[in-house]
Image (cartoon, rainbow, N blue to C red):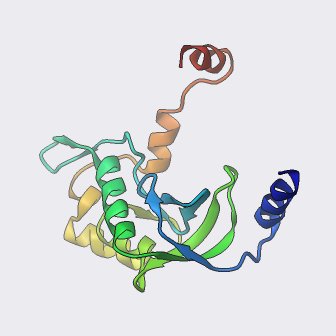
């Protein structure tokens, strides 16, 4: 068991992880699991699961859940192929991934269900121009939403842990 932990740690610290593939399950609009491996798609940021966005008329819609559901549909269609590029502070593998040759980050940004934080600027510009997804109305960026909705830490976390 300890040896397996060392192998996982070594793989997490190795920036040259080999490509991998498999059936995946969406966690939200920009991350998923293949088995026990958690993957975060590089170059895009999708609304958080609990995040709401607004239509042009100011009506709220569950953009975070819609993004997760779209990612789930893409992942359900075929195995996902990923090219890893390190890990993040949460231990997730950062990767560029595709399903049947379709870049998942590009699809999500192009459909207006994520913003570009990397190479998807063209797809984002097109989604904005066409008023797709989150670009149909108002929204906080996922980063801003996370900052505004962060839970207090410390004693509250300890008490919350007891209540769960």
Of all residues, the one furthest to the bottom in this rendering is: 101
- The quarter of the picture where residue 100 lies is bottom left
Question: Residue 141: percent from the left, percent from the top?
Answer: 42, 50
Of all residues, the one furthest to the front in this rendering is: 1
Does residue 108 appear in this view? no
Q: Residue visible at 39% across and 68% down?
A: 75
The answer to whether 137 appears left or right of 20 in the picture is left
Q: Residue visible at 81% across and 64% down?
A: 13
- The quarter of the picture where residue 110 lies is bottom left
The answer to whether 89 appears left or right of 81 in the picture is right
Q: Residue visible at 54% across and 27% down?
A: 151
Question: Residue 53: percent from the left, percent from the top?
Answer: 28, 45
Question: Residue 140: percent from the left, percent from the top?
Answer: 38, 46
The answer to whether 131 appears left or right of 122 in the picture is left
Does residue 21 appear in this view? yes
- The quarter of the picture where residue 162 lies is top right
Q: Residue visible at 41% across and 75% down?
A: 106
Q: How many marks?
A: 0
Q: Out of 35 and 109, give the one closest to the viewer.
A: 35
Q: Out of 20 and 84, give the one closest to the viewer.
A: 20
- Residue 66, compared with residue 111, is above or below; it is above
- Residue 124, compared with residue 19, is above or below; it is above
- Residue 164, compared with residue 57, is above or below; it is above
Q: Out of 35 and 60, give the one closest to the viewer.
A: 35
């Amino acid at each position: 068991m300890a040896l397996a932990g060392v192998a996982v740690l070594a793989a997490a610290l190795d920036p040259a992880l080999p490509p991998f593939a498999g059936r995946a399950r969406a966690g939200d609009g920009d991350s998923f699991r293949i088995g026990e491996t958690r993957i975060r798609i590089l170059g895009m940021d999708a609304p958080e699961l609990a995040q709401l966005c607004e239509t042009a008329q100011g009506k709220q819609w569950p953009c975070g859940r819609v993004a997760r559901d779209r990612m789930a549909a893409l992942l359900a269609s075929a195995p996902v192929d990923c090219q890893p590029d390190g890990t993040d502070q949460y231990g997730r593998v950062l990767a560029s991934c595709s399903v049947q040759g379709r870049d998942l980050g590009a699809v999500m940004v192009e459909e207006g269900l994520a913003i570009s934080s990397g190479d998807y600027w063209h797809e984002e510009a097109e989604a904005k121009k066409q008023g797709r997804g989150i670009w149909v109305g108002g929204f906080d960026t996922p980063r801003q939403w996370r900052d505004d909705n962060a839970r207090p830490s410390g004693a509250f976390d300890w008490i919350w842990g007891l209540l769960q």
